[in-house]
Each structure stands twice: as structure tokens, then as C-alpha cells.
Amino acid sequence: IQLTTEGRGTSRLLMKVMMRKLNEKYASVLDGDQKALIKAYAFSSANDDQTSIRLKLQETKDNLISSLTSIGDADVAKVTEVREKLLAEDLTTINDDTVTRFLLYTKLNKEILSGDEDV
């Protein structure tokens, strides 16, 4: 199904309203990277093209692997476990569960970068 110019405008308006509602409701819970991840997922779903979400997920994955590497020997078992899970992430099929996991990965990365001891 191809959208007419009018249909595309309606889709863009709907996405804009949805993103505004999301930002209003979850502004205090989600950080900028998490919002960008959700936005990329929404746009990819709306356009039936997973390119942008796949790139965002890969960026999130690479950033967290880099952060895990910087931890050193603090808690080798946990770092190794998370690293193995990340390396096993297959971005071929992207769905709600994938994005949910990556929202958690984004939060973990922020905690590592901030030096949070509760990681």
C-alpha cells in the first residue's frame, strides 16, 4: 500500500502527536537516548523500513560494549555476562521485546558512564 501525499502528512502528524504525548508522559523516566530509540522504532514501524532502528540499536550495542570494556576488573562475571548477551543480539528481527531490551541497555550504559556503583 502506497501512501498518498495526504496520507504521509497524516502519518507525520500522528507520529508528531504520539512523540509529544510520549515526551509529556515519560519525560522524567526516559533519557534522551531512550526517547531517540523509541522514536527510531516508531518511525521504522510506520515506514515499514527497519534501517533507522537497526542503526540505532547497533549504535546502542557498540556504545555499551565500549563502556563495559572500560569497567576493567570490577565485577568480571557480570561484565562478561552482559557482554556475551550483547554480542549475541541479532538485529535481523526487531520487535517490541528487542527495543525493550535495548532501552535497558541504554540505561545501563548511562549508569556505567556516570560511574554509578549500583551497576
Image (tube, helix red, strand yellow):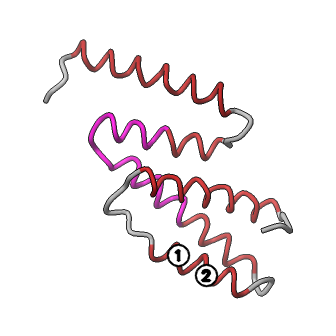
Q: Disc 1 and disc 2: Cα gap in Å?
A: 6 Å
Q: How many marks?
A: 2
Q: Nearer the viewer, residue 47 or 28?
A: 28
Q: Residue at x 51, y 59 (%)?
A: 59
Q: Which region is colored magenta? A: 39-61
Q: Residue at x 81, y 83 (%)?
A: 74
Would you identify the image quadrant in which residue 10 lies?
top left
Query: Disc 2 marks which amino acid?
Result: Glu
What's the residue type where badge 1 is placed? Lys
Residue matched to label 1: 85
Kindly report the secondary structure that dominates the magenta region of the rendered protein.
Answer: helix
**Residue 72 left/right relative to 33:** right
On the image, numbered disc 2 is attached to which residue? 81
Residue 53 rendering spot, x and y as whole percentages: 41, 49
Residue 81 painted magenta: no
From the viewer's side, name the closer residue of 93 and 68: 93
Residue 87 drawn at (x, y percent): 48, 76
